């Protein structure tokens, strides 16, 4: 989960004690904070791209059991990367979908949100969300741990939504994969939603 790891200078007593000591090493703590933020950002990027296309997974691609961390060697060092492993329920419209049905997409997106961040203060809640698991994995024992996760997630969502919408509007190769009527309805939805959020 850290890629590069600095062993703590303590005698092993038990697993919990040793892990706590490992995360107390300043280099490990800084790395854990950075990799947690990157994983939450990547989770937001995945969700943001799916939402921008009018897609959803009913939670399947975002439930904790279907997310993981994978070792990766990049830019000369070992690091970790978030991966999503199960897309059986991933619904991304194609050229046969002629209408974007906001009501159905929103209902299913609520399930995605529930598994991503627990759906706080709403009827369908998941006590152990994907963000919760990332906070536990990286031992974020800060009072503002949930806020840190939320900020990284929302930054990733914003980035992905903007990029996906620009690509749909400006790349004919991508737009060709969707029905023109569907894209028109989706643009109307994005425009209306943007006005409501102002």
Image: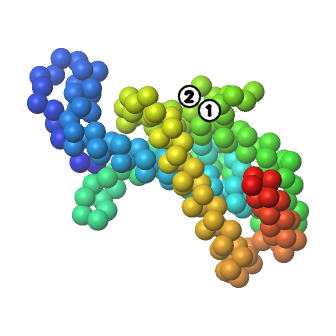
Residue lying at 29% horizontally and 65% vertically, measured from the top left: 75
Residue 169: image quadrant is bottom right
Q: Secondary structure at mark 1?
A: loop
Q: Is residue 27 above or below residue 90?
A: above
Looking at this view, is 37 or 178 the one in front?
Answer: 37
Label 2 belongs to which residue?
128
Q: Is residue 182 above or below residue 152?
A: below
View extreme (top): residue: 13
View extreme (front): residue: 198
Residue 120's x, y, as percent? 65, 31
Residue 17: image quadrant is top left
Q: Is residue 11 above or below residue 87?
A: above
Q: Secondary structure at mark 2?
A: loop
Label 1 belongs to which residue?
118
Bin the neighbour count of mark 1 within 10 Å (Cα to Cα): few under 14, some 14-19, many 20 and up.
many
Q: Is residue 142 above or below residue 161?
A: above
Residue 19's x, y, as percent? 26, 28
Position of 100 with respect to 198 (left or right) is right
Looking at this view, is 47 or 140 the one in front?
Answer: 140
* CB within 8 Å, label 2 to label 1: yes
Task: Pick the quarter of the image with the N terminus.
Answer: top left
Residue lying at 60% horizontally and 40% vertically, measured from the top left: 116
Task: Pick the quarter of the image with the C terminus.
Answer: bottom right
């Amino acid at each position: 989960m850290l890629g590069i790891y600095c062993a703590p200078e303590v005698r092993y007593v038990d697993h919990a004690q040793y892990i706590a000591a490992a995360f107390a090493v300043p280099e490990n703590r800084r790395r854990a904070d950075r990799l947690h933020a990157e994983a939450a950002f990547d989770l937001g990027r995945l969700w943001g791209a799916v939402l921008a296309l009018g897609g959803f997974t009913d939670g399947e691609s975002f439930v904790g059991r279907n997310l993981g961390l994978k070792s990766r060697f990049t830019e000369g060092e070992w690091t970790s990367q978030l991966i999503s492993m199960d897309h059986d329920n991933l619904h991304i419209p194609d050229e046969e979908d002629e209408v974007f049905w906001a009501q159905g997409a929103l209902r299913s997106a609520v399930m995605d949100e529930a598994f991503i961040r627990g759906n706080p203060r709403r009827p369908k809640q998941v006590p152990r969300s994907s963000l919760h698991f990332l906070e536990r994995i990286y031992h974020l024992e800060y009072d503002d741990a949930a806020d840190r996760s939320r900020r990284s997630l929302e930054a990733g969502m914003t980035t992905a939504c903007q990029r996906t919408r620009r690509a749909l509007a400006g790349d004919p190769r991508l737009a060709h994969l969707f029905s023109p009527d569907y894209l028109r309805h989706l643009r109307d939805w994005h425009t209306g939603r943007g006005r409501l959020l102002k």
